[in-house]
Amino acid sequence: MKKMSTELKVGIFVVLALVVLAYMTVHTDKIRFGRAVGYKITAMLDSAAGLVKNSDVRIAGVQVGSVEDIALETKTGKAKVTLSFPFHITLPVDSLAFVKSEGLLGEKYIEIQSGVSKDTLIRQGGEIRQGDSLADMDQLLSQLSSVASDIKGVTSSLNSVLGGKESEQSMRRIFDDLGEVTADLNSTVKDNRESFRIIMDNFEKLTGDLVGVSAKAEDTLNTISLIVAKIEEGEGTLGKLAADSSLYDQTRETMTSLNKIAKSIEKGEGTLGKLAADDTIYAEAKKAIKKVSKAAEAVEEQVPITVLGTVLGTVLR
């Protein structure tokens, strides 16, 4: 048997080395030498569609870990995803996990929204909560399909309403009516152009009158403001009355004196008090008036009124 030449052996060795190098270049993240260094946590996701083992786990778009395993949790019907992190990556207990994709049709990955509770961290074997689930492509396509069906139904209804010769004639009549209305409006405007001009002139005059009234009102307000300022400064009669408190003091003293006089009269003190309290004076005055009335009646009976008038006229002369 013919032996292999040295050149052939070297060539085979080089080819095998290149194959191994290419494999390691493509799958370098899947090759681990020795025991993996890090810790693992789990995330319970509503759907892990598109996720595969060794998918990226990122924080703020930076890869910090990978997907270790994906399994179905039969009790809850959710996907149990095991995530692997190196020890220097710490996650607060209130962190959230989201399933995202690179672009519209890109590969899926786990995005971690780091929490703010730096005192309590997720440890080995812990669980990270899922954030609000995002609609995947299937859901979006389903919703778009539903929207398209609704649009198709609307267009079908419009087609059934507007389709046909009768609908076409109705639409034509509507446009003809609109044309007639527009023509009538144009004719009305032309015929009443002078009236419209007069109306606009009157409106302009009214606006000018309103401006004049506004100016007069402003002058009146300025005058009132000046009067108020003078009153506040104590100028004029009203200003002196408003600024000088002596009138108020005098009025108060007068009211006090009148109050004292009224109390004295009620108590029967002084001449007015005695007159107000003693009824005898009233009775005597009443008797005197009666006597005077009787005397007058007697005189009237004895002396005729004409003679009395003549005597009084002579005396008065």
Image: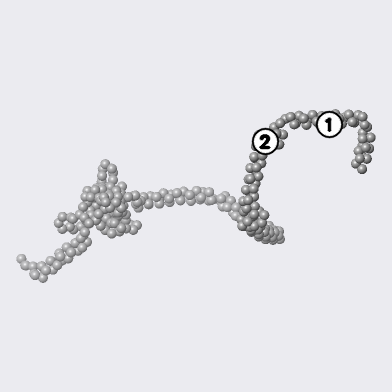
| Left or right of residue 274, residue 125 in this image | left
Residue extending furthest toward the left: 1
Q: Can residue 26 be seen in this snapshot?
A: yes
| Left or right of residue 150, residue 276 in this image | right
Q: Position of residue 7 (x, y in %)?
A: 10, 70
At 15% from the left and 64% from the top, the residue drawn is 16
At 48% from the left and 51% from the top, the residue drawn is 155
Mark 1–mark 2 distance (CA, rounded to whole Å): 31 Å
**Number of the label disc, if any, that sits on residue 292:** 1
For label 2, the residue is 269
Give the amino acid at mark 2: Glu
Q: Check disc 1: other Cα within 10 Å, few if <14, some if 14-19, many if 20+.
A: few
Q: Can residue 66 be seen in this snapshot?
A: no
Foreground residue among 72 and 42: 42
Q: Secondary structure at mark 1?
A: helix
| Sequence order check, earlier mark of 1 and 2 | 2
Q: Position of residue 165 (x, y in %)?
A: 56, 51
Q: Nearer the viewer, mark 1 or mark 2?
A: 2
Give the position of the N terminus as an image quadrant.
Answer: bottom left
| Left or right of residue 59, residue 263 in this image | right
Foreground residue among 188 and 296: 296
Q: Secondary structure at mark 2?
A: loop
- The structure's colour scheme is one colour
In the rendered view, tell whether residue 315 sits above or below residue 20: above
**Number of the label disc, if any, that sits on residue 150:** none
Give the amino acid at mark 1: Val
In the rendered view, tell whether residue 280 sits above or below residue 59: above
| Left or right of residue 276, residue 168 in this image | left
Foreground residue among 105 and 85: 85
In the rendered view, tell whether residue 275 sits above or below residue 210: above
